Image (cartoon, rainbow, N blue to C red):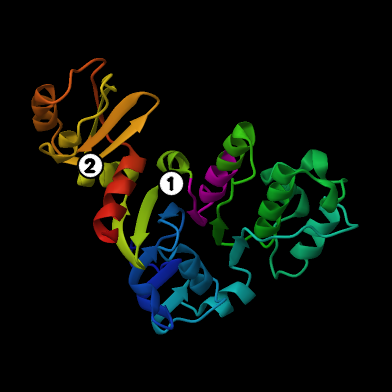
Amino acid sequence: MITTQGGSVPAVQFTRVAKAFGAVHAVDGLDLSLDAGVSVALLGRNGAGKSTSIGLLLGLDGPSEGAVRLFGRPPQEAVRAGRVGAMLQDAKPVSRVTVRELVSFVARTYPQPMSVQETLELAGLTDLAGRRADRLSGGQAQRVSFALALAGNPDLLVLDEPTAALDVEARRQFWASMRRFTERGKSVLFSTHYLEEADQNADRVVVIDRGRVVADGTSADIKRAVGSSLVSFVLPEGGLPAAVHSLPGVLAVDVQDNRVCVRTSDSDATVAALPAHVPLRGLEVTSAGLEDAFLTLTAKDGA
């Protein structure tokens, strides 16, 4: 677990948090601490407990056991004080108001808001400020949701799948804005299914499965800890023998675009054993990426 620096109060603190819905334990003894000025990716399979954890963090629900604190306070208090901004997936456009009017209205509900112009610039909406908020494309509407999360000048920004409706260029601009935000000493917690975004933009990656943290560290730390590699080769004409699945070190086998991809904990042993079972063409061995590490971690805990 990564601890806070200098003994300061964490931006987010989950202490042995559990949340049950009947017999289903959505969160099961979750411990998590988040410092100021960092960007943290929260990763997990569907049903792993991400959405429930975010709901507890924002005070939308209460834990069955344990405690959640934001800046040392109950979540509802931190939210009311304007210290938290959230961008969730179910935002709906407001009709008959311009983007600037909407951002201005939301900003006025906070005690120390960010200036409207600065909010629009940070969200990439300066050129759209005079447009009606309900007449924007999906990607533009997503940027409006981002602006509304920023409007209160929060110390913590919580983002649930923030780039789902954005094209490649808009995603690049979005993450550049995130970096400028954290450079001010602000904190960002985001969930995403785009693991390459977590790899490239998070200072820290937290993987949860079955409501518990199964990995916590930098992307490089997690990839090293899993210690797997990828061995790939051209799919043999006669198909892939079943014996490949049981070779030394093999964790998983997949076929993609006429290539066999073998995830392995011991690439040397796997490669040495392969020729006895398949004719090798186009052999490649690479280190595992964050996606491969994620699959390994969740497969182990989800078995």
User: Residue 149, how many percent across, how many down?
Assistant: 65, 59
Residue that badge 1 annotates? 202
Residue drawn at (10%, 37%), measured in percent from left and top? 248
- The label on residue 213 is none
Residue drawn at (31%, 41%), measured in percent from left and top? 292
Q: Which residue is more in the foreground, 182 or 173?
A: 173
Residue drawn at (31%, 52%), measured in percent from left and top? 217
Number of dots carrying numbers: 2
Residue that badge 2 annotates? 224
- Name the image quarter holding the N terminus: bottom left
Q: Is residue 162 left or right of residue 38?
A: right
Q: Earlier in the sequence, mark 1 or mark 2?
A: 1
The magenta segment is 176-193
Residue drawn at (42%, 78%), measured in percent from left and top? 19
Q: Say if residue 2 shows up in the picture.
A: no
- Name the image quarter holding the C terminus: bottom left
